[in-house]
Image (spheres, helix red, strand yellow):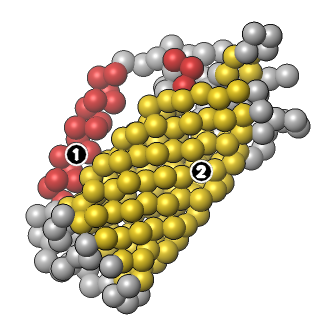
Amino acid sequence: MSWTRAPRNIVDSQTQVGLTQRKPTSGGNMRNLVIAGILMLSAAGADCAQTAPKTEFFVGYEYEHLNPGGTGCHGLGLNLAYNLNDWLGGVGDFGICREAGLPSGVSAHDINYLFGPRVTYRSYGKWNPFGQVLLGGQHLGTNFGTANSFALTLGGGMDYKYNDRFSLRVIQVEYLYTHFGGATQNNARIEAGLVYTW
């Protein structure tokens, strides 16, 4: 039995689940992308004027588009942000999703745990756009075994402030980097849901 997705290999003594591995690409491009993202996030907070809540808790739907193969993964996203000032905060992020469209008899789930800075622009009235760079890990579990990888997200989103306690996270879209099976996977992550602030 084999999966349709390649580099996220899980190997036991008898069976290799996965397809051929690709050679990893140079790390220089990823390093440059991370540096550029951090610089953009730092520059984005210069004009923020609105007072930010100290803490924001998000719960909502999470979708991951996993490559290669374009497998969809549907689940739950959670994050807790602590705002150091009106524009800069730190985020702890957790998500779990179940992969869809796998062959009969194969099941898989992904768990991500990420941490990093978030920059929010709070001068659009009720609309609060934000950008973030998060680093951490991604866990892949299947009925054939498990694997772990370094993970990185780079992206942002938009919150709509309903009142002083609740906001709607209209959209959050991120590039999701993982490195399973000795090869790079360029994935996407999308979230939407509710934010409670205090």
Horizontal and vertical percent for residue 126? Answer: 32, 84
Horizontal and vertical percent for residue 148? Answer: 54, 29
Kindly identify the residue that appears in the image at 46 percent across and 45 percent down: 113
Is residue 175 visible to us here? no
Q: Which mark is residue 96?
A: 2
Horizontal and vertical percent for residue 139? Answer: 56, 36
Kindly identify the residue that appears in the image at 18 percent across and 79 percent down: 51
Q: Is residue 96 left or right of residue 100?
A: left
Check the image and name the residue furthest to the top.
13
Is residue 44 visible to us here? yes
Q: Is residue 34 left or right of residue 161?
A: left
Q: Which residue does the numbered mark 1 point to in the structure image? A: 38
Q: Residues within 10 Å of mark 1 (few under 14, many from 20)?
A: some
Q: Quadrant of the N terminus?
A: top right
Q: Tag 1: residue type?
A: Ile
Q: Quadrant of the C terminus?
A: bottom left
Q: Tag 2: residue type?
A: Ile
